[in-house]
Structure formats: C-alpha cells, structure tokens
Image (cartoon, helix red, strand yellow):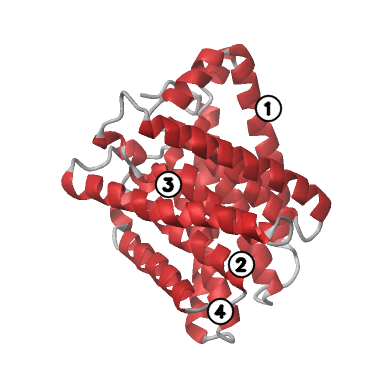
Amino acid sequence: MKSNSIKFFPLTLFSSIMGLAGLALAWMQAQRLGMVGSPQIGVYLRFVASVVYGVLLLFYAMKLLRFPQQVLADIRHPVRLNFLATIPFAMLLLATSWYRDWPELAELFWWAAALSLLCVTIYTMNSWIHHTHYEVTHVNPAWFIPVVGNAIAPIAGVHMAPQDLCWFFFSIGVVFWLVIMTIVMYRLFFHAPLPERITPTLFILVAPPAVAFNSYVALTDTVDGFARVLYFVALFLTILLASSFLRFLRLPFFISAWAYSFPLAAMTLATMEMAARSGGALFYVGLSWAMVVALSVIVAWLAYKTLASALKGTLCVPEN
C-alpha cells in the first residue's frame, strides 16, 4: 500500500468487520438450529473476518505511527469519531463467534474489547457534552455506534463475565439508544436530508433494538413482553427501510454502505432466536431464511465493491 494510501486509510472500513462477523454468526446460528448442515459456512466466514480484522488493524497502526495527525483528525471529526468504536465493537463480535470453539482466547479478547469500548464510549460522550463544534446537521445514525455498541457485550459476556457487569453494558446501550434515537429522529424529521455519503447509515436504526433483543434474551433466557417489544420495533424499522429499497439502490457506493450489513445481521440473529423460542413457527423460520440469503448477497456485494474500489485506488482518499 502506498504511503499516501496509508495516510487516508478510512476508519470507517472497520464497519466491514462488523458485517462479516455478523454474517458468520448468522450462519453459525443457522447451523446450530439445524437450518443448514455442512459445510460450516459460518466457521469459514469467521476465519475470513478475523484475518481481515488483523490486516485492517495493521494498516491503521501504520497510519497511527506514520501519520498521527491524521488519526487525531479522525477522532476529532464530528462524524468519523463515532466509527472509532467499530474497532472494539468488531472485536466483541469476533470474540462472540469464537467462544464455543476457543473459549479461553475468546474471553481474553472479550475483556479487551469490552473495556476498550467502554473507554471509547466515555471519550465520545465527553466530546459530545463538552463540545465546541457540533451542530445538529452533524447528527446521524452512526452516533448509535459508541454507546449502543455496549449492548452487544452480554451476548457472549454471560458466559465470561459477572452478571452485573453484563447488565451494566446492557443498560448503557438501551438507555442511550432511546436518548440518541430522539435526537436522530429530530434531525431527520426537521432538518435537511442526510448527505448521500452517509445515507446508508440509516440502516443503523435497526441495530439497537435488534442487538438489545439478543442481549436481553441471553441475560434472561426468555422471550417475555419486553423482549417482544424490542424485536417488533426492530422488525418495523427493517420494514420501513426496506420500503425505500430503490432509493438506497440508486446511491453510489461509499464505504458507509457497510452500514447495511451488521444491522441486518443483528436482525437475522434476532429472528432466528424468535424461531427457536417459538417452536419453529413458520413465519419466523421463513423470515430467518429470507434474511440469511439477503444478508449473504448484500455482504458479497459490499465485499466486491470494496475490493474493486481498492484496486481502482479510490478507497483510501481524503474525506470531508
């Protein structure tokens, strides 16, 4: 990779790991539920996601060492700052995917990722509270990532950490989801539409209730009324965004398009959980299959477009 490419290596690219890891988890869950047999597609995808994550970490470490001012510009930027959380967020997902086969290694990475995400959350929220440069037009669904990402921790954390710590992370994610949801909706309803570059982040609206559902079920081992509220809010938001399919399809490709992937993965996992807990109800089983197929196609398309962009030299370019 050229020096200039390293200088402009996009922090937002770590969201691709969230999509790949989410797809791996979806296929692994499908196999555990008997929806698919061999080959173990999820296991292969888990390996690919882990390798790509290591490569991206290496590139971003090179950027930090050679161009520290560019990294500082990332974490001071009103939009890119929120993607800093994708680094520990992606590690949490990978730790979750490896837990059943390598529990000791997964636990090590879970603790590193959970504590790192907490630090990033505190840093980001301090930036919001003590800001001198934020405007309402800077608000977009990517603001969910630093705080709502905490809600992912209990999914595997219930096997590796004290229960109260898992509830701590869950509480941060759920409460601040509601706070930020209000702010984001105000911005979407009463101000100019999102710029094309960050329009795909609208799909992040699906992630908080879907992730919260998965975490709540992991914590309580039941699908009660609250769990159903979380699931059906996520389902409604998925339908709402799907109704604008053609609008999203007409957008040019940006790295932010990876925002389609993890929210759909979280919703797929939530639907599979509903299928398992409802005794294989036809609606949830059918929807699970449809979402796995759709998610796989979307991630394949995103991977192709990202590689094509890298080969054309348009991936690592200055951002506004």
Which of pointers 1 and 2 indicates the residue nearer the eye? Answer: 2
Against 64, residue 186 (above or below) is below
Estimate the spatial distance between the alpha carbons at disc 1 and disc 2, rounded to whole Å.
Answer: 34 Å
Q: Residues within 10 Å of mark 3 (few under 14, many from 20)?
A: many
Identify the residue at image location x=51%, y=13%: 69
Position of the N terminus by quadrant: top right
Against 267, residue 125 (above or below) is above
> Which is more N-terminal, label 3 or label 2?
3
Identify the residue at image location x=56%, y=52%: 169
* Image x and y of residue 15, in percent: 53, 42
Secondary structure type for disc 1: helix
Q: Which mark is residue 58?
A: 1
Estimate the spatial distance between the alpha carbons at disc 2 and disc 4, rounded to whole Å.
Answer: 18 Å
Identify the residue at image location x=37%, y=46%: 141
> Which is more N-terminal, label 2 or label 1?
1
- Residue marked by disc 2: 219
Q: Which mark is residue 275?
A: 4
> Which is more N-terminal, label 3 or label 4?
3
Instruction: Tell me the amino acid under the disc marked 3.
Output: Phe
Q: Nearer the viewer, residue 64 or 296?
A: 64
Secondary structure type for disc 2: helix
Q: Residues within 10 Å of mark 4 (few under 14, many from 20)?
A: many
- Residue marked by disc 3: 144
> Which is more N-terminal, label 1 or label 4?
1
Estimate the spatial distance between the alpha carbons at disc 4 and disc 1, rounded to whole Å.
Answer: 39 Å
* Image x and y of residue 112, in percent: 69, 41
* Image x and y of residue 52, in percent: 66, 39
* Image x and y of residue 263, in percent: 47, 55
Q: Nearer the viewer, residue 303 or 190?
A: 190
Estimate the spatial distance between the alpha carbons at disc 2 and disc 3, rounded to whole Å.
Answer: 21 Å
Instruction: Tell me the amino acid under the disc marked 4.
Output: Ala
